[in-house]
Amino acid sequence: MADRIRLGIIGASPTVGWAHRAHLPVVPAAAGFELMAACTTRMETANQSARQYGAMMVFDDYKSMLAHQEIDAVSIELRMPAHYEITKDAINAGKHVFAEWPLGRMRMLVNSFRAKGVRTIVVLQSRAAPAVMHMKELIDSGYVGEILSCSLRQIGSCALTRDSGRTWQRDVELGANTLTISARHVIDALRFVAGEFKQVSAKLTTQVSKWHETDTDEMVDVTSPDNILVNGILENGAAASVYVASIPFAGNGLKMEIFGRNGTLKATSGGSTNVGPVKL
Amino acid sequence: MIWPILTFLITTIMSVKPRDGPAFNVWQTYHQFGKGIQSEDSSYPDFDTVVELHVSLDAIRQLSDEGRAVEL
């Protein structure tokens, strides 16, 4: 392998999406990486990304990119239903994989990535938010003493309308929804700072069973949960209460509080731990 | 002569490095991953972490489906 990790981004749209928001702009500034290739479904957009962000190669077919010797690692930045096949192909091609959560059937790939000797990282980026990392350091160093209880609330307002580009989030079978994205990221942050759950009880509900699709002007059925209520006990004995919801109006973001015997830590964000910024 | 070049370099660096929000967090995860690939350090969330997360998500779904509730 070269000194720098030669990265190709699959789903490297130059104008919309997560790669455009959070990957393409940062890879050129990431130590140890070189943005080698941009892959989209069309050469025009791949070329545009390559020009904007300085990739050396372009592809409109991810399989040709995976077959290329000068690619060491790939980021897979697609809508969730496409993750599994492409991740599997990437592992089989011997590439390190930078994968997005949620990953659906990804557990089936756990053995194959090890057998192929490639590295995988899953973008659970709450763990990389500076305020969350600092919170963990403080807790680990005994700043709040014994953790007695935790309260976690994250409320976003997008329950009533979406555009048809988001239609894959309304079907519970497709796996990307308030539970698997919003709740998962904040629960991951809570586990990261305060410890694993030992016991849970939970209630998931779909309070808004139809969305107004803004561009098609249609009402469409929603089967994904939009209210997630989880209560439990952590392995360290702390009581934890989690409420994550997508509501119609005035969602007010994140509040994560850790109540210890010697003090309280509170993290807040207008958004959430995965999309920050977070204040401690 | 040197100042325009320096100013250009500084503004370029400042504009490339995200300082907060989603891009910042993703940028940080690239650093973690880069270290992992180059040095066998594995202090980042990988597919094994995801399996643990799936287990807890599945538990949440299952409990919601089966959970006992008292009708009032």
Image: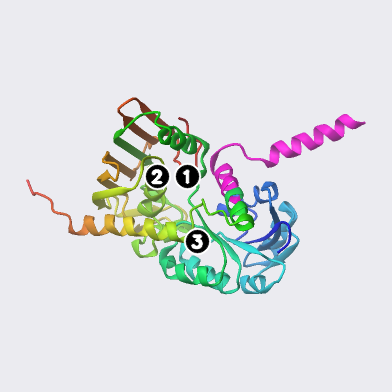
Q: How crowded is mark 3: few (under 14 residues within 10 Å), some or many (20 or more)?
A: some
Please determine if labels 2 and 1 lie on a single subunit. Answer: yes
Q: Which residue is denoted by mark 3 in the rendering?
A: A79
The chain carrying label 1 is A
> Which residue corresponds to the image point at 12% horizontal and 51% vertical from the top-left?
B69
Q: Measure how far apart labels 2 and 3 are at the Cα level.
A: 20 Å
Q: Please tell me whether mark 1 sits on a helix, a strand or a loop.
A: helix
Q: Measure how far apart labels 2 and 1 are at the Cα level.
A: 7 Å
Name the chief secondary structure element in magenta: helix
Q: Please tell me whether mark 3 sits on a helix, a strand or a loop.
A: loop
Q: Locate residue B14, reporting x and y percent.
A: 70, 36
Tell me the magenta residue range. Answer: B1-30
Considering only vertical position in the picture, is A151 above or below B47?
above
Which label lies toward us, 2 or 3? Answer: 2
Q: In which quadrant will I find the N terminus of chain A?
A: bottom right
**Count of all numbered marks drawn on residues in the image:** 3
Q: Is residue A27 left or right of residue A134?
A: right
Q: Are marks 2 and 1 in contact (CB under 8 Å)?
A: yes
Observer-nearest residue: A166 or A233? A233
Q: Which residue is denoted by mark 2 in the rendering?
A: A186
Q: Measure how far apart labels 1 and 3 are at the Cα level.
A: 20 Å
Q: Which residue is denoted by mark 1 in the rendering?
A: A126
Extreme-right residue of the structure: B1
Observer-nearest residue: A228 or A190? A190
Viewer can see residue A223: no
Q: What amino acid is at disc 1? A: Ser
Question: Is residue A105 found inside the magenta-colored segment of the image?
Answer: no
Q: In this view, does A71 lie to the left or right of A250?
A: right
Q: What amino acid is at disc 3? A: Arg
> Which residue corresponds to the image point at 33% horizontal and 59% vertical from the top-left?
B55
